[in-house]
Structure formats: structure tokens, C-alpha cells
Image (cartoon, grey):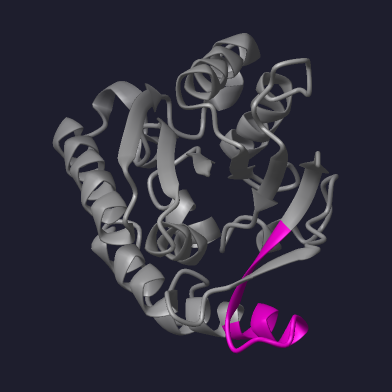
Amino acid sequence: MTTLVLAAHPDDEVLGCGGTMARLAQDGEAVYVAILGEGITSRAAQREHADAFQVEVLRACSHRVANHLGVRECFLYGLPDNRFDTVPLLDIVKIVEDLVAKLKPETVYTQHGGDLNVDHVQLYRATLTATRPVSGCPVKALYAYEVASSTEWAFQQFSPAFRPSVFVNIETTLERKIEAMQMYESEARVFPHPRAPEALNAQAQRWGTTAGLAAAEAFDLVRLVR
């Protein structure tokens, strides 16, 4: 089985399904990650004034994180951080379509469409278009994941609201997920921020108890074809 995880920014893939990726890889499945945005440049007053060295550090972190989680390959692109709405949606769709054609994943995980972050929303839209169930499409299962400090901070004011119905047991890989997040030094935060280790642990326990597990990641099922 082949799984493709799509992320708008470096760290989204860990926050959304780091434990699931590690578990799938641990079980011998082929897991690939694609991070479409450069990350971090929106913190500068203007994109052209952003620190190029920080961007390169973040890219290097993405590869180290992927290796830590057992990902076979991490594809990095350079879409403008927090500015996906300035890029033609078709351009984003084409990136995802090319990845699907190349990797032929049966399962795809992507950002949630009701998030606060505009890049997450655009990638969600693009993923639905790129994986539409036309004849020959290899994608049979499509899931949307939450991102701490983006999904919950939308306070369900945007549609669709995050209503997970699929839960993956990450009891054996939760520690690896938290370690991976700490590897993103520029993105990690301290408690009580939602990206702090204690908060990520609590989030996993919360979804775990929802599904009768010690720790879990939760996903909104978009489409399942059997």
C-alpha cells in the first residue's frame, strides 16, 4: 500500500498525522510526504525580505523529520507562505496531480478545509480536484487532518467544520511524533501553546479516549471507495 501525505507547511505533516505516518512505515507501508509551501517567509514584513537561510534550514529539517518518521521520500516545493491564495488554484492542483500520477497512492491525507490558515484551505480544495474519482484514479481513501493552532482556532466558524470519524491508534508512535515536532525548532512552541509537547500529548489522549484507545490521531473522512 502507498500513502501520500500532503502539507502546506513544514510541520503540518507532523502535527496532522505524524503518528500515523510512523505507524504505517513501521508496518512496512510506503509513505511519501509532499510539502508545498516554503514556510516561515510570512513572518517577514515582505516576502522578499525574508531570511533565505531560515528557509533552507526549514527544508533541511523537513528531510530529517521524514527520515525520523520512516517516510520513503519527502518532496519540497516553494509556494509562498500564507499566500497560497495569490497562486492560481490550478497550479496547486497540477502539483498534486503530478504526485498522484507518479506515486499512485491508494490513500491520501491532506489539510482540512475549515482551517484558519488560507494555505490549508487552498490545498484542501486542490486535493479534492486532483483526486476526483474519475476512471483510473488510484486514490481510494481521502482523509483530512487537523493542525494544532489552526483547525481549533477557527472555532468551527468556517465550513466544513472538523468532525472526525476515523481514528488511528498511535500509542506506539506518539513519542516519535512529538520528537519529530521538536526537530522543527523554529515551529515548536512551549506550553500552553497547542504545538507544545504537552498539548500534543493531551490531544492524542483526547482522541484516544474518544475511540477507546490510549492515544490516537483523528481524521475527517472525505471519500472512501471500496
Q: Which residue is at 40% across, 52% downward?
A: 11
Q: In this view, does 101 lie to the left or right of 75?
A: right
Query: Which one is nearer the viewer's eye here, 27 or 46?
Result: 27
Give coordinates of residue 199: x percent, y percent: 51, 80
- Quarter assignment of residue 57: top left
Give coordinates of residue 10: x percent, y percent: 38, 45
Q: Is residue 224 left or right of residue 215?
A: right
Q: Is residue 187 magenta-colored?
A: no
Query: Which one is nearer the viewer's eye here, 146 or 106?
Result: 106
Q: Kindly tell me whether residue 21 is visible in this rendering.
A: yes
- Quarter assignment of residue 46: top left
Above/below status of 13 relative to 125 = below
Q: Is residue 128 left or right of residue 94?
A: right
Give coordinates of residue 84: x percent, y percent: 55, 25
Quarter of the figure with the C terminus: top right
Q: Which residue is at 29% across, 21% downward?
A: 48
Image label count:
0
Q: Which residue is at 45% across, 84% downward?
A: 198
Q: Kindly tell me whether residue 192 is visible in this rendering.
A: no
Query: Which one is nearer the viewer's eye here, 28 or 218?
Result: 28
Query: Which one is nearer the viewer's eye here, 174 or 37?
Result: 174
Above/below status of 51 relative to 31 = above
Q: Is residue 207 magenta-colored?
A: yes
Magenta-highlighted residues: 205-219
In the image, farthest residue toward the left: 53
Above/below status of 87 relative to 53 = above
